[in-house]
Amino acid sequence: MSFEDDPTGTYVGSFPKGFGYGPEETEIEGATNPGEEKPRILLMGLRRSGKSSIQKVVFHKVSPNETLFLESTNKIVKDDISNSSFVQFQIWDIPGQIDFFDAAFDSEDIFGGCGALIFVIDAQDDYMEALSRLQMVVTRAHKINENIKFEVFIHKVDGLSDDNKIETQRDILQRATDELADAGMDNIRLSFHLTSIYDHSIFEAFSKVVQKLIPQLAILENLLDIVISNSKIEKAFLFDVVSKIYIATDSSPVDMQCYELCCDMIDVVIDMSCIYGARDDGAFDNESAAFIKLNSSTVLFLREVNRHLALLCILREDGCENRGIIEYNFKCFRSAIQEVFVARNKQANKSTGHPQMDHLVNGQIDGTLDSGISSQSNGMLGAAGGHSFLNGSVRRADDDDDDD
Amino acid sequence: MNAIISLCHFCELHGPKILYCTQPFRPQEPNNLDGDEAEGNISHRLKSTSVTPSPSADIHTSTSFSGCAKDQCEGCKSVQTGFVSHDDEAQVSYVSTQQPYNPEVFARIRQACIRSLSSEVCPGREGPIFFGDKQCGHVLSYTFYVPDSQARGMHRWYSIMIVMMDKIYLLNSWPFLVPHMRIVIENLQNKAQKVYNQEEAKCPQRPLRLGARVDPSNFIKQRGGTKPARSLQELTGDKNVFRMLHVAFLWILKSCGNRITETLLEGPPTEDTIIDMEKQEETEEGFIKIYMRKVGEFDAIESEANSDKTSVEKKEPSKDSETEMDIISGPVIKNLRHLRMILGSSSFLSLAHHVVVGNQVIVSGHQRSLVTSILNSLKGLLPKGCCRVVPYSTEYVESYKCNFLGLSPNVLLSQHVILSEQFVHLEIVEKPALSSPKEAATGQGFGWSGPDSDISDADLDGDIRLRDFQFNITTPFTLSSRVPTVLTRMVMALQNKNLSQEVVEAAFTCLKEEWMNKVKVLFKFTKAGGNRSEEDTKKLLQIVGARDEDKQLLKFWMTGLSVQYRTHILSSSVHR
């Protein structure tokens, strides 16, 4: 895909039209409140550090090689990502040549409504200049908005050897935190990620950035924990299907290879249903499910949660005996997620018009919701009991998968 | 035009930069001290080294460049000194430099440059946009790209901006400015495209860049970070590109300034000016088209009658005056006072009476200039909208087509015209050399002869020649003995010897305007309000101060209302 030929593509829309998902499921999602401010993610960094490439690769499915032909960004490019009720934000790609703290710009406006600031450092280049710029950006942005979360992407690490990667990260981390400490800003926490657009590291890093902007993250993680403990699952991800960002995972640590496996599985499922699917308008719908056995006695399991989200699980082969239980537990999980959506829509309606007040109100609801969900998820079936009388349903599920 | 045109570009290393800037300087402009000084310096420097930069200047450039390499690269540089052109006639100097030297101006241009390239979004990316405010000036900016095989994305962004404080002027000049900016831009792009195609044929960039990607160690060296951006000269393959831009910008500034001139209008326009405006319609080439009213073809006839002399389209708004100028040879009547003097007060009064109530006035005679000048003088009695003139014709034109008709003397009026039409005929006859006016007068049947007793020898030059003519007025139609109020007032003004000609004209304008307003009231009353009884109309006339003898006049003058006013009244009455 060459998007040089598409002059408007850079500025409008978030996804190519080919990724249409079919009709809008308004009954689950509810209408987005137009007055609601979407959290904003700023992409900053020196010129040529790879900001536009990241944005293109993650959110526009541009092939990494194609980013070599991107033109330099000359103005702030705003990109609306609003796939699901959870993943709703704006990416602002900010050109590195221009100092937006200059008096000519309204820096209050740019940084005021900002949720996260991603600073991209080119690891293949001399990064001293980038570090001084980072320090300047962080201190000034922090002055304007104390709630900004700062993320540093040590980018283009595909060109470095493994030792070199570790060394570079250590060095950058050391220098950056030292400089901040010198400036008396030790209270600011920077998160560092090693990224490259040629592998999945950029998706993983972006996932972590996005997760911090989801207020319901704790509930989602809690739900996933309950699911895996009750279903003998090793690892579960809640994925945004189009961007392949995972918006939540269980509390066990994320293994990069597991994540890559899951990403690849989404690609396989989408490609398969694009080719053989019954519907023309979308590859992913509420019937979407997949079950892949690997020869390493690992099983991958995908189920649709809503229009944009999918649950991906990794489990041992012997855990699959009780697929009926997994199926049942998944249904519980899905209804719980939908409850979270309903609660979210309610709180959106309750908006007081004052962000601080909203926050308070939302926090309260989240708390009550949390207890409600945990009481509900007690209804999930334990892996040990009951699978003997669920055999029939397991077989039926098998048949379904064969049809897929 | 009081504007600055500048060329800006988005530098890969430095962001938006001003590249080139053309501004007019006027010596009489009251400048503040430092501005003046800077300006003087520039023009002085420019005069000494101008147009052809010497090789020594080039050396100086390279040395200074290495010094401030961080600040400026090849791509951000245009001209070392600049160009200047003097327009001696208009007392304007056009100066092109890389940046404006006046710090205030620089700040404005810089601000506009950043906005044009890095803030404002143009739909379709390439194209003209307008932005700005009172403080920073108003900007018409045209963004475009120039192909560059070395650049990221294979092209670089440029913009041409016109910065001006006068928003109305700038927006009104849009239809002129944008196409001409486009010509300049297309010129640059075509040149650059040629260079790009050549380079691409020699060494295609796509496989080169993709190939470079394969080997990671190579990639670091391949990255374009150290490569300086190329200058516009190099991109277009034209060393004189900035000289060309200087000429182009200068031309745009100068011709745009000539395009629109401002006229100060005092008070609301009179009915006459509105009529004039309706007759004119500006065409794209800056000519004035004669406005054709759909209802009557009077203007069309007018131009037909003139077609031997003038074309339909011409620069002068008033064509009658021009025709008149062409044939200024014989004796002429200069104005109404003059005419009154020639004709004598009583016959003038009856002639004028015919004129103001709308009867057709036919003037016939051999001397074309004399005939038209009489008609032109008589036109002064009527609002412009009521005048339908055929200055000189060789056949009779019906009264519904014109109320002022100049005829050649050998045209005979047919019997039915004499019987049915309401007209007054002024015949200009050359006197037989020795005949006395008295004899001529007795020769006439039922008209008045123009007694020339009023003319004294001390009068104007033309009068001597005019003494050779005899003016006979005939009409089949008798007017009421009472003269319309406005005409009595006009005649009073003419009679008053203390008033100069200008004052008389102003008084006429006032009187006509006053009565046009009454006509408007009557028009609105009759047309907009539906059926009105005789009683009501009488009452209304009483209120506006019109008497019975004015009725006919008011009715006639109603035909002279501007189209604008008519449509306004009629549409507003429809709404109700």
Image (cartoon, coloured by chain):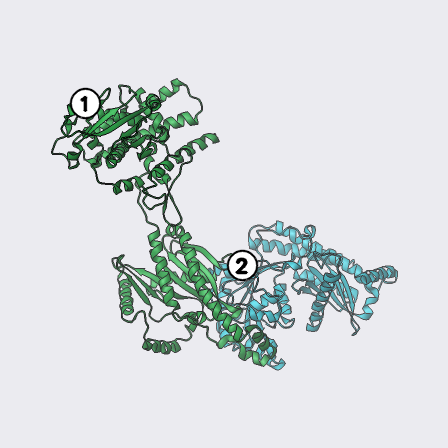
Chain colours: A cyan, B green
Viewer-proximal residue, B252 or A74? Answer: B252
Tell me the chain of label 2: A
Horizontal relation, residue B93 to residue B6: left or right: left
Say if A391 sits above or below A295 in the image. Answer: above
Say if B283 sits above or below A215 in the image. Answer: above
| Mark number displayed over residue A113 | 2
Residue B273 lies in what quarter of the image?
A: top left
Which residue is pictured at 18% across the width and 21% down the height? B442
Q: Is residue B274 visible?
A: no
Residue A269 placement (x, y as % from top left): 73, 64
Viewer-proximal residue, B138 or B502? Answer: B502
Viewer-proximal residue, B477 or A66? Answer: B477
The amino acid type, in three-letter code, at marker 1 is Ala
Determine if marks 2 and 1 fall on one subunit: no
The secondary element bearing badge 2 is classed as: loop
Q: Is residue B61 visible?
A: yes
Q: Closer to the observer: label 2 or label 1?
A: 1
* Circle 1 residues within 10 Å: few <14, some 14–19, many ≥20: some
Residue B552 lies in what quarter of the image?
A: top left
Residue B144 placement (x, y as % from top left): 47, 62
Horizontal relation, residue B72 to residue B309: left or right: right
